[in-house]
Image: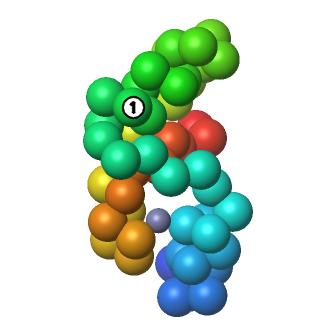
Amino acid sequence: MKKPTAGEKKRQCTSKRRYRSQGDALDAALLAGTERQRKAYLCPLCQHWHLTSA
Ligand SMILES: [Zn+2]
């Protein structure tokens, strides 16, 4: 498996919604009914939280 490039990482960041806290991110996942498939992670690029799509 190929490592994501810096550009790909940046796209993952900019194309995703940002949340101010892990709680905000998990709340959003809960509202969308996707909390089982999604995890929140702290993004090193923007220092905000995103949800994984895995
Ligand atoms: Zn980010």
Q: Nearer the viewer, residue 26 or 6?
A: 26
Figure colour scheme: rainbow
Inspect this view and state whether residue 39 appears: no
Q: Residue at horizontal 65%, vertical 17%?
A: 32
Q: Secondary structure at mark 1?
A: helix
Residue 48, quarter of picture: bottom left
Q: Looking at the figure, which quarter contains the C terminus?
A: top right
Q: Residue at horizontal 39%, vertical 31%?
A: 24
Q: Residue at horizontal 53%, vertical 25%?
A: 28
Give how far across and how far down residue 22 sits, in percent: 30, 37
Q: Spot the residue most to the front.
A: 20
> Relative to residue 23, is residue 20 depicted above or below?
below
Q: Going by the image, does 15 lie left or right of 47? A: right
> Relative to residue 35, is residue 21 depicted above or below?
below
According to the picture, the residue beneath numbered tag 1 turns out to be 24
Image mark count: 1
The reply to whether the residue tagged 1 has its Cβ within 8 angstroms of ligand 1 is: no
> Relative to residue 5, is residue 39 depicted above or below?
above
Q: Looking at the figure, which quarter contains the N terminus?
A: bottom right
Residue 39, quarter of picture: top left
Q: Residues within 10 Å of mark 1 (few under 14, many from 20)?
A: some
Give how far across and how far down residue 52 sits, in percent: 52, 43
Q: Residue at horizontal 52%, vertical 14%?
A: 30
Disc 1 residue type? Asp
Give how far across and how far down residue 6 sits, in percent: 52, 88
Residue 53, quarter of picture: top right
> Relative to residue 3, is residue 34 depicted above or below?
above
Inspect this view and state whether residue 43 appears: yes
